[in-house]
Amino acid sequence: MISKKWLIIDTIIIVLVVIMVSLHSCKKNNNPAEETVIVKTGTVKEKIIAVGSIVPKHTISVKSNISGIVGQLFHEDGDYVDQNALLLQISPTATPQSIAEAHANVKEQEAIVEQTESHRQRLEQLLKLSLETPDNYAIAVKDVAMNKARLEMAKQKLALLLKGETNIAGKSIKTMINSPISGYILQRNVDLGDPVVPLTDMQAGTVLFVIANMNDLVFKGLVNEVDVAKISSGMIANIRIAAMPNANVTGTLRKVDLQANNQSTTTTTTTSPFNVGFNIELDHLTLPKDMKLRAGYSATAEITVQQAENVLVIPERVLIFKNNKVYVNLQPDKSKSKPIEKEIVLGLSDGIIAEVKSGLGEGDKILDNNTMTSKS
């Protein structure tokens, strides 16, 4: 009986201790000092956010003017190539019809050369007998030379179709594709034996390589139509790269498109005309030393359009909007139990903190609306 009696007493003591701790905690949480925001001096910046990525300023798609199959590759993805460096060799896949036409063209040009040469010889004999003028003979000599050149061209075309190479002015000419610029190979789109469709007026042709100058990178992104009127060329932007969150990169706004691209700047697929974006481009990127950017890095650009320094600021969460006016609840005096509602005039805002132009002074204590709501 005694042990049971002491057990009951111990239980009662524990319950009383828990109640006292809870009351003390509630009293501490109800301390008005912890539910107020103090008006301070600070800086407010209005920023425009552009969402995009880091890309090369100039990207070249290498194509071929002749058809065939890839016979030899000289470079891979990621290689650096100089201008005019050999990229690949194309082995022609001539059709029987094209070979027959080339043979026929050679025979035709041979017949023309033979005919014009015979005419030249006849005029030469007549000129010796003073029966022909020197001018007519000169024209005949010129015709022979031109037709011989056409014959040589026809033979070279036939050699290219049959062997994939020929010889012009003592130089061996093969069906080689050279790099048009100096830069890095971002993509190699063909392998050995792949067919190559030529670039013509009727077709786009096969993209063999994609080459870019990685020393000339830019930021390309989208700005919401609500903000695009606030920015202009020459503004400086801070660029945040997702893969390098601590890197400090800046750029200069080079251009803003005059026409929207009808692509939403949000993650939704809405086609609302009020949610379209305008393309912008930032160049002259300044990077930290030893930092290496890669094409395709996702990034955001922050462009400061307005700034107010050394002004009174308060969090936007304490604002009360009603009847087209802005109010805050001031901490009541000891003689009053209800908060004092005070009308204020706002200035610049960044969406988190707002500038107070009038109605408050530095050090004033404002009741935090979020804390009051949670308490209720």
Image (cartoon, grey):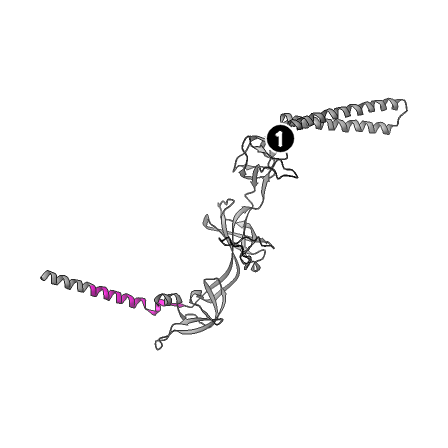
Instruction: Give how far across and how far down residue 35 sits, in percent.
Output: 36, 67
| Towards the viewer: 211 or 213 | 211
| Quarter of the view holding residue 375 | bottom left
Residue sitting at 23 percent across and 66 percent down? 19
Q: Which residue is mark 1?
A: 175
- Where is residue 24 drawn, in percent x and y? 27, 67
Residue farthest toward the right in the current orientation of the protein? 130
Work out whether residue 251 or residue 228 is closer to the camera in this orientation and state it. Answer: 228
| Dot 1 amino acid type | Thr
Segment colored magenta: 15-38
For the C terminus, give its image quadrant: bottom left
Image position of 270 (left or right of 315): right
Q: Position of residue 219 (x, y in %)?
A: 54, 50
Give the residue drawn at x 32%, y 69%: 31
Task: Establish if 208 lies above or below 311.
Answer: above
In this rendering, the count of numbered labels is 1
Left or right: residue 229 versus residue 140 is: left
Q: Is residue 125 magenta?
A: no
Q: Position of residue 76 (x, y in %)?
A: 52, 35
Q: Secondary structure at mark 1?
A: loop
Residue shown at 26% from the left, 67% from the top: 23
